[in-house]
Amino acid sequence: MATSDSLSKTYFQISDVAELLDVPATTLRFWEKEFPTLISPYRNSGGRRYYSPTDIENIRKIIYLLKERGLKLDAAKAELTHNRAGVEKRFEVIERLKQMREQVEQLLSALNSKRQ
């Protein structure tokens, strides 16, 4: 999944976001309709969608609620409406823990390769 460091561009095309987050473009378009206050990509005169880093971070929160926590769409909407700060805090903690786990795994791998 993307990190904030990899979101240095101003806008991303839908195909880039789909690849970055491993989510089909059709799902992104669907979520755009379901979560209009969170995901609002810029559209050029030809109608092409361009997502901001903020849109991408919000999509990552939706992925967290739907895929990692296993909430249904309506429950995820309610959670984001009534407890957005709590969702953001839990999401940030989990993302940080994932980063820490990755760092520990890299350290273990480096130690194991030195032992051999």
Image (cartoon, grey):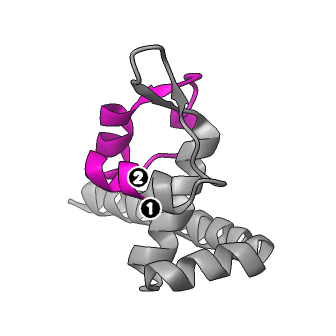
Image point 29% across, 46% down: which residue?
A: 25
| Depicted 97 relative to depicted 115: above or below | below
Q: Which of 107 and 78 is in front in this view?
A: 78
Q: Is residue 96 above or below residue 13?
A: below
Left or right: residue 64 versus residue 30 is right
Q: Where, by quadrant of the figure, is residue 76 drawn?
A: bottom right
Q: Which amino acid does label 2 sit on?
A: Met
Q: Which residue is drawn at 41% across and 52% down?
A: 1
Position of residue 47 in the picture relative to residue 52 (left or right): left
Quarter of the image for the C terminus: give it. bottom left
**Magenta-colored stretch includes residue 25:** yes
Residue that label 2 marks: 1
Q: What element carries label 1?
A: helix
Q: Name the residue under label 1.
A: 102
Disc nearer the start of the sequence (2/1): 2
Left/right placement of residue 44 relative to residue 89 reads left
